[in-house]
């Protein structure tokens, strides 16, 4: 029926009523009679516009809901109705009928008949079917109402029998009309939640008890139906369902409800204000709500006049400011991967944010509705991440603040892991937070060492979920389990020794995570992501060595140490690394200048592995004093002074050295014997608040021997190096014994005249900033026996130990010197010579010697005198050039001379010199010959000399021919081999 006066449009249907000529009476008096009123759609769904964006120039998308049916029954005291529109619209006399609780589907699709009885079904908002949850009345004017010459729009108002809010419940959502508008106020998930939370339908999982649904009806302050749409003011609030029932909801065929609150104000079917609050969590585990508000706004446009459209505003409200973490909260490693005991978010509500994208369809079936339960990054309207401000409390109660973007995860999301994984992969480094050097504990420190795990932190990089225990597993994204994946921290010990290192990138040590700090022998809790090579000069680390190692582990009490530990799949330390791996960690370290220290490092026994775990100053001193005490790895640490006036930086290491390794093919044995040697390095630097440094350095190497190319061997019981600020280094060497071996053992007899301790009284020790020079020079007195005379004999021994650089330990021994050779005469015959040898750790560097012999005679008869002499000698020199090639020189010479002088007036002299030299440098050899004849004549005041000189040289081939050059493969070598091939017998 249509009544233009008040724009009434209504379809009236009668059930079990007939017209008897005067009135409408029940057709069957024993059966109920019903009046059904069908009304036009009561709601229009419109596309919303995000706040801050420009409305589209044309119309926005919109569609109407389905019709509404109001069903009434005749009360028992009413025997009939007048056959008039006014009588049929007088609903106050009739009884409104509601859909029974628990029913969702009518008896026939498209009808409003449930259990054979017509029911009131109102579609509001669009796609949501609601009915009364308690007895109600409909108040309306059957006739058109006029006032001041105007006719009011027909309307009917829903009224509660208790004169309070009307209670409504949703019993079904329409799902066969296609998807809802993407930008509409309500999503399909919201409608499903309204049905679950208001229908009071019992949800039962087969074989289980009913689910305790936090059900509550919608409260209606106003609900008025009109031909143009409903004018409504309703709201609802619901408690959170039990999180453990999520899978039970799914088993019962319902999504887990996430709707927290719902407010709806509409006028004549057009939305004026809609507020939808969905419950969820931020990825840190804080409970939060996603609030979506839609408001009708009016905008003046030049061509269209006043335009009204729905404007959408989104924000996140944090409902749980603080979350506790730690053991028992579901972390893979009992919370050790999360250094904060709690995180508190200071933001109570965010600024307006960008709505989550809901344009993704189900990949398994594109025909399914758009997904509306998506996790999303909380972004501001401009697209930038909203930086939540968090205050973290570490295990020592210290607080730090930082900002971090977070993901909002709706509670109704069934499996958030794939979405979280995709979201966190969008922008690498998104979860890296700046802390600006705030100090925090990265791990729970030992009870007796508070503050030992604290660092000034520049950045923290967070991960989310459960860390895989084994390499074959994958990390899982879990809401509420943030952990620190990596960090950039300040390590004072590294900075002091390596000023350019700056902050270092670290991560948690595997043994610490899987087994606890106490289970790590060194008490490690962090490790450097990029191990740092540490190379110290000998003046920094103890004088006798220039240690090089790779720092990796950061420990609670031992400072920064190399990683010398072998672990199994569970992270448990099962022993020290293999010897080869340990030596790699110390590759490049030098002992006494050039000797590779790593070659002498033995395997570490299990006993000392745990010494680094509880390593205080007293423990270090006890280890240094004990003859067999060991520190299996160098310790690099910084501690505050007791008086608070500065810091002490310390590098300390005490290790036992092993046997000399066998040389490889083509290699020479290392020139040091360390079978029972012990190396101790201890360097301390005290840095006061006024930036003044006071350093003390001590190094000790005991019970070792230097082997100089099987020529000489020096055994040293103890070599000690001590230095302090502003003081000359103090070097002492005790128990030194020099022994010549093999072909030079005869020199031991020569040195038997020296004191037993060659470095005893009368010796010299010179210390510079570059090396130590210790030696002895001894001159023998002239020895005369009859016609025999031995003079100018001296013995020299010198040991040079450099502190650093490429030069190694060197030893020099000499019998006399080239500038001062020894002399031997026997009657008319005489001669002399010298010998010196310089040997370093690579072998002989220089060997030279010479011996000369001959005779002389003289005659004087008064008026004339004269003399003649003949000398012959051999010189030998071997030296190593800068290019690494040896230079060898062997020379033999003959020197003859004579003179005759008459009356002192006339003098004639003749000198003859002949020399033959063979030189070889590398593979190039040269033979040189040289002869000189000089005749001199002097008469009175006139003299004249004539010299005749001849020199020739012959160069040899660059090198000897190889075997392959001497014996070609074809045919000679093959024929040679075939000559020895076994013969077949047959």
Image (tube, grey):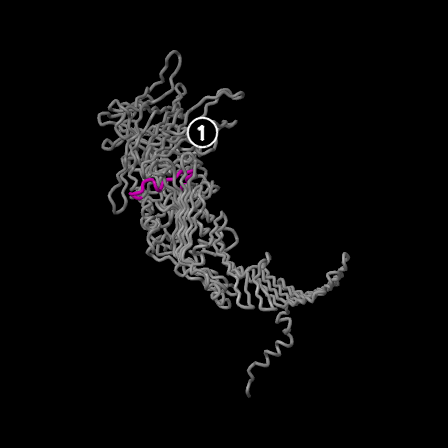
Q: Position of residue 444 (x, y in %)?
A: 32, 42
Front in this rendered view, residue 851 or 985: 851
Q: Position of residue 727 (x, y in %)?
A: 44, 43
Quarter in which the C terminus is drawn: bottom right
Whether residue 449 is in magenta: the answer is yes
Q: Does residue 969 appear left or right of residue 102 in this picture?
A: right
Q: Does residue 799 appear left or right of residue 263 in this picture?
A: right
Q: Does residue 979 appear left or right of residue 450 in this picture?
A: right
Whether residue 300 is in magenta: the answer is no
176 vs 57: above or below: below
Front in this rendered view, residue 146 or 419: 419
Q: Position of residue 563 (x, y in %)?
A: 40, 51
Magenta stretch bounds: 446-462
Residue 105 in view, yes or no = no
Q: Which residue is mark 1?
A: 48
Quarter in which the N terminus is drawn: top left
Q: Position of residue 30 (x, y in %)?
A: 22, 32
* Labels in figure, total: 1
Residue 7 in view, yes or no = yes
Front in this rendered view, residue 458 or 854: 854
């Amino acid at each position: 029926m249509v009544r233009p006066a008040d724009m009434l449009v209504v379809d009236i249907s009668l059930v079990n009523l007939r017209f008897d000529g005067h009135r409408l009476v029940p057709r069957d008096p024993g059966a109920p009679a019903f009046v059904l009123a069908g009304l036009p759609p009561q709601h229009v769904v419109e596309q919303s516009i995000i706040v801050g964006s420009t409305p589209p120039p044309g119309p926005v998308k919109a569609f109407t809901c389905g019709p509404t049916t109001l069903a009434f029954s005749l009360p028992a005291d009413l025997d009939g109705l007048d056959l008039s529109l006014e009588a049929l619209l007088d609903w106050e006399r009739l009884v409104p009928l509601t859909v029974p609780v628990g029913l969702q589907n009518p008896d026939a699709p498209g009808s409003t008949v449930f259990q054979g009885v017509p029911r009131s079904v109102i579609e509001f908002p669009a796609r949501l079917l609601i009915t009364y949850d308690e007895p109600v009345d409909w108040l309306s004017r059957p006739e058109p109402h006029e006032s001041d010459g105007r006719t009011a729009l027909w309307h009917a108002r829903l009224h509660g029998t208790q004169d309070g809010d009307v209670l409504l419940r949703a019993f079904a959502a329409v799902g066969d009309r296609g998807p809802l508008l993407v930008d509409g106020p309500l999503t399909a998930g919201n409608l499903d939640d309204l049905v679950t939370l208001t229908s009071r339908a019992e949800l039962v999982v087969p074989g289980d008890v009913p689910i305790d649904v936090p059900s509550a009806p919608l409260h209606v302050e106003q609900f008025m139906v009109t031909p143009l749409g409903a004018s409504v003011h309703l709201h609802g609030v619901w408690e959170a369902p039990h999180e453990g029932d999520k899978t039970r909801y799914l088993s019962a065929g319902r999504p887990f409800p996430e709707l927290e609150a719902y407010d709806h104000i509409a006028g004549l079917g057009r939305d004026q204000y809609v507020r939808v609050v969905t419950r969820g969590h931020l990825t840190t585990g804080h409970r939060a709500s996603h609030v979506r508000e839609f408001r009708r706004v009016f905008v003046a446009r030049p061509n269209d006049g006043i335009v009204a459209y729905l404007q959408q505003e989104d924000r996140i409200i944090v409902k749980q400011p603080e979350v506790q973490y730690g053991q028992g909260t579901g972390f893979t490693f009992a919370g050790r991967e999360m250094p904060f005991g709690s995180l508190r978010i200071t933001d109570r509500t965010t600024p307006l944010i960008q709505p989550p994208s809901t344009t993704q369809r189900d990949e398994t079936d594109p025909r399914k509705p758009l997904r509306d339960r998506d996790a999303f990054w909380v972004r501001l309207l401009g697209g930038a991440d909203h930086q939540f401000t968090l205050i973290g409390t570490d295990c020592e109660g210290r607080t730090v603040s930082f900002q971090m973007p977070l993901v909002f995860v709706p509670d109704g999301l069934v499996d958030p892991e794939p979405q979280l994984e995709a979201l966190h992969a969008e922008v690498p480094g998104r979860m890296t937070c700046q802390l600006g050097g705030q100090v925090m504990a990265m791990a729970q420190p030992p009870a007796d060492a508070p503050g030992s795990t604290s660092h000034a932190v520049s950045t923290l990089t967070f991960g989310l979920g459960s860390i895989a225990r084994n390499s074959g597993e994958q990390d899982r994204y879990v809401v509420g389990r943030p952990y620190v994946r990596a960090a950039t921290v300040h390590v004072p010990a590294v900075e002091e020794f390596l000023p350019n290192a700056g902050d270092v990138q670290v991560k948690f040590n595997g043994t610490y995570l899987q087994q606890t700090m106490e289970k790590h022998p060194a008490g490690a809790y962090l490790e450097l992501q990029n191990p740092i090579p540490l190379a110290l000069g000998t003046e920094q680390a103890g004088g006798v060595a220039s240690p090089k190692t790779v720092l990796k582990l950061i420990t609670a009490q031992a400072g920064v140490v190399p990683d010398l530990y072998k672990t199994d799949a569970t992270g448990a330390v099962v022993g020290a690394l293999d010897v080869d791996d340990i030596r790699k960690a110390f590759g490049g370290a030098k002992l006494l200048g050039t000797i590779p220290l790593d070659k002498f490092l033995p395997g570490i026994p299990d006993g000392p592995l745990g010494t680094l775990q509880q390593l205080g100053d007293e423990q270090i001193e006890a280890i240094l004093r004990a003859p067999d005490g060991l520190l299996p790895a160098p310790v690099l640490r910084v501690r505050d002074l007791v008086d608070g006036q500065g810091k002490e930086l310390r590098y300390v290491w005490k290790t036992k050295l092993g046997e000399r390794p066998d040389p490889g093919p083509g290699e020479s044995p290392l020139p040091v014997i360390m079978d029972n040697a012990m190396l101790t390095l201890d360097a301390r630097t005290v840095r006061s608040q006024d930036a003044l440094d006071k350093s003390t350095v001590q190094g000790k190497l005991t019970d070792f021997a230097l082997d100089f190319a099987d020529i000489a061997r020096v055994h040293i019981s103890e070599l000690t190096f001590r230095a302090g600020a502003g003081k000359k280094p103090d070097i002492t060497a005790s128990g030194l014994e020099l022994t010549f071996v093999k072909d030079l053992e005869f020199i031991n007899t020569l040195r038997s005249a020296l004191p037993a301790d060659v470095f005893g009284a009368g010796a010299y020790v010179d210390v510079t900033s570059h090396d130590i020079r210790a030696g002895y020079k001894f001159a023998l007195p002239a020895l005369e026996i009859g016609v025999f005379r031995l003079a100018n004999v001296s013995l020299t021994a010198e040991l040079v130990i450099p502190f650093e650089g490429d030069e190694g330990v060197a030893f020099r021994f000499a019998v006399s010197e080239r500038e001062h050779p020894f002399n031997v005469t026997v009657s008319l015959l005489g001669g002399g010579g010298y010998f010196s040898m310089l040997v370093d750790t690579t072998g002989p560097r220089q060997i030279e010697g010479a011996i000369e012999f001959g005779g002389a005679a003289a005659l004087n008869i008064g008026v004339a005198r004269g003399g003649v002499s003949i000398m012959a000698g051999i010189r030998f020199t071997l030296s190593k050039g800068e290019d690494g090639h040896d230079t060898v020189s062997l020379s033999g010479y003959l020197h003859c001379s004579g003179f005759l002088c008459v009356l002192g007036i006339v003098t004639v002299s003749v000198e003859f010199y002949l020399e033959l030299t063979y030189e070889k440098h590398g593979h190039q050899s040269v033979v040189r010959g040289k002869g000189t004849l000089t005749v001199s004549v002097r008469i009175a005041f006139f003299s004249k000399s004539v010299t005749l000189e001849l020199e020739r040289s012959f160069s040899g081939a660059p090198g000897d021919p190889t075997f392959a050059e001497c014996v070609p493969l074809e045919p000679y070598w093959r024929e040679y081999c075939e000559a020895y091939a076994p013969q077949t017998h047959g």
